[in-house]
Image (cartoon, helix red, strand yellow):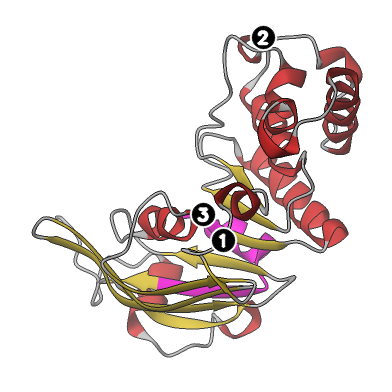
Amino acid sequence: MIHLTDLHKSFGSKHVLRGADLHVPKGTSTVIIGGSGTGKSVLLKCVLGLVQPDQGTIQVDGRDTGSGDRDAFLAQFGMLFQGGALFDSMSVWQNVAFRLLRGSLKRPKDEARAIAIEKLQRVGLGAEVADQFPAELSGGMQKRVSLARAIAADPKIIFFDEPTTGLDPIMSGVINDLIREIVTEMGATALTITHDMSSVRAIADRVAMLHGGKFRWEGPIAEMDDATDPYLHQFVNGLADGPIETVR
């Protein structure tokens, strides 16, 4: 579904991506791991066309991302943002139905609200929260609303940016289970970036380790623990000593 070849991106003298290659099979859940500042978020932005790579090619569903209708291209994607990124001035249902109230995916207001309530129920929230505002909800409930928004338009591809950031271990487990269930039900292709190894083990079919602007290792989750790559081994096991430099 997503194929990146020799992707390069620099910001001035800072080289973020240095020839990244990644293949994300259709209908699978791939998780990108790596330390802070390794380019994980930049890579997602390149796929979405928010950042233009300096070199390399990006194909989504066999098509070059730089060609064709931009709105139709973006309509394929859903996104769960790291901090939730809910609009404080909008009610919960308006947040969930954000894409259904405007643009090429626009639906009548009543229909958009009904879809929003359906998606809220899918993530374990009752219809009674639809007219509340994000500030009235707990952090875990806000994350569920964000997940409902990500799936509201039934996207073919869903990006999850640090989906469990700021959540306690129990709620993190709940969100991980929801992500796994929903991605499987929808048959969507999922691409997640995270530091949380419990999330990796809960939602990944495949894992890709990004370091130094390149993918050091990529493979099935079942092979991750036995892989011999020293960068992967250090990161997965949280070791201070290894090829990844740490500030002491």
Is disc 3 in contact with disc 2, using a CB cutoff of under 8 Å? no
Examine the rendered structure and indicate whether residue 169 appears above or below residue 115: below
Residue 201 highlighted magenta (yes or no):
yes
> Which SS class for mark 2?
helix
Q: Nearer the viewer, residue 147 or 68?
A: 68
Residues at marks 3 and 2, CA–CA distance in whole angstroms: 27 Å
Residue 171 falls left or right of residue 10: right
Q: Which marked residue is nearer to the observer: mark 1 or mark 3? A: 1
> In the image, which disc is placed on residue 196?
3
Q: Please state the extent of the stretch shown in magenta in the rendering.
A: 192-209
Q: Nearer the viewer, residue 11 or 92?
A: 11
Q: Work out whether mark 1 precedes mark 3 in sequence or the reverse, and give the earlier one.
A: 1
- Callout 3 amino acid: Asp
Find disc 1 in the rendering and name its residue: 68
- Callout 2 amino acid: Glu
> Which SS class for mark 3?
loop
Q: Give the image location of residue 92, x and y in percent.
A: 72, 18
Find disc 2 in the rendering and name its residue: 136
Q: Give the image location of residue 206, x and y in percent.
A: 61, 75
Task: Give the quarter of the figure containing the N terminus.
Answer: bottom right
- Callout 1 amino acid: Gly
